[in-house]
Amino acid sequence: VDVDVDRLPFEITPVLASVTDETLIGKVFARWKPQSVFHAAAFKHVPMVERNVGAAVFNNVWGTYICATQALANGAHSFVLVSTDKAVRPTNVMGASKRLSELVVQAIAASPAASSRAFSSVRFGNVLGSSGSVVPLFRDQIANGGPVTLTHPEITRYFMTIPEASQLVLQAAGMAKGGEVFVLDMGNPVRVYDLARRMIEFSGLMVKDELNPRGDIEIKVTGLRPGEKLYEELLIGGNPQTTSHPKIMKALEAQIPLDALEAELAELLVLLSKNDVAAIRQKLSNLVPEYSPAKEIVDWGYLADQQPDILSPAIPAHPPAA
């Protein structure tokens, strides 16, 4: 939606910065003293994170720690981590890094320095129409004549619209006391194959398959990608607590004390500096016991270190004879 910023009742100041730049983030927070911080910056593309583990974990986890601690140091009253359903029993590094980010916010919220602050997390699924959503992807594929691609015929996902997700995140932030992991009621999961089929039919076209070989658009199954799950969940434990809002619940999740967690994060930083992906995944498993990593490591940099020739084509020692 286009917004006329000159007519807003407040000023928007864009700042280009990495959430992992502690010095710059500290200067930004010290200059503008935000009262409320909504932290959504993360690398969220599951297969890409699997292939770039170190950069993603550093951005997602360390970026959360920097933003949360700087918000606390500069007087922010509330801090909201925008989390994901992929943080629940993750099978991928992205989900494990987001669950560890939740643990960071929980630990800071439980510290004495944050006793009068409302630091919390909000966990939900896919947002229809957002960047990376399957809806604009399917729409473009249909417009181009297909095929519409999905990774598995039985894959399911939770979906919510942009306005609904935004409003519920703001409402959850307003009821936070500190340390909560809020869970938005996403309704029932949707089978992505059914979504693709409906979008084709709503476009006035027919699905091309074995039963209808003269159809317009084929649905092509490409296979699950690294780290991808067939279905997502919103809760690790059971019996979520209700809140005053019917679509917002509180998950009862394990916590780690801040001093112990900071010691673990220091060790994680050392592993990140070495790009030791096997050890990074083991550290994530130790901190997020529900994490079940894929057996195969597909990280580009790590594979290049382990097998130097894997990314380099063979070069002949001498040019071929004329």
Image (spheres, grey):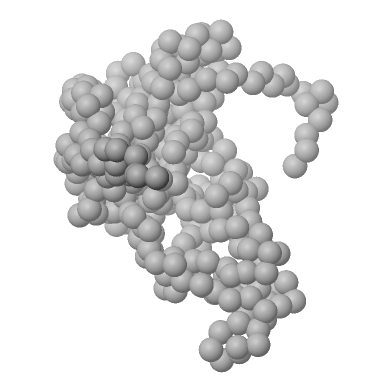
Counting from the top left corner in percent of width and height, residue 170 is at 57, 38
* Residue found at x 51% / y 53%: 126
In front here: 28 or 116?
Answer: 28
Which of the pair 161/304 is nearer the observer?
304
Establish if 8 lies above or below 165.
above
Quadrant for residue 70, please give it: top left
The picture places residue 165, in percent across and down from the top left corner, at: 57, 48
Q: Position of residue 216 (x, y in %)?
A: 67, 79
Q: Residue at x 60, y 48 (%)?
A: 130
Query: In this picture, is 251 found above or below 108?
Result: below
- Specify the farthest residue to the bottom: 211
Q: How far across and how far down the image is residue 123, in percent?
A: 43, 46
State the residue lying farthest toward the front.
322
Q: Is residue 125 visible?
A: yes
Residue 217 vertical placement versus 68 (above, below): below
Residue at x 50%, y 35% (from the top left corner):
40
98 vs 293: above or below: above
Residue 299 appearing in the image: no
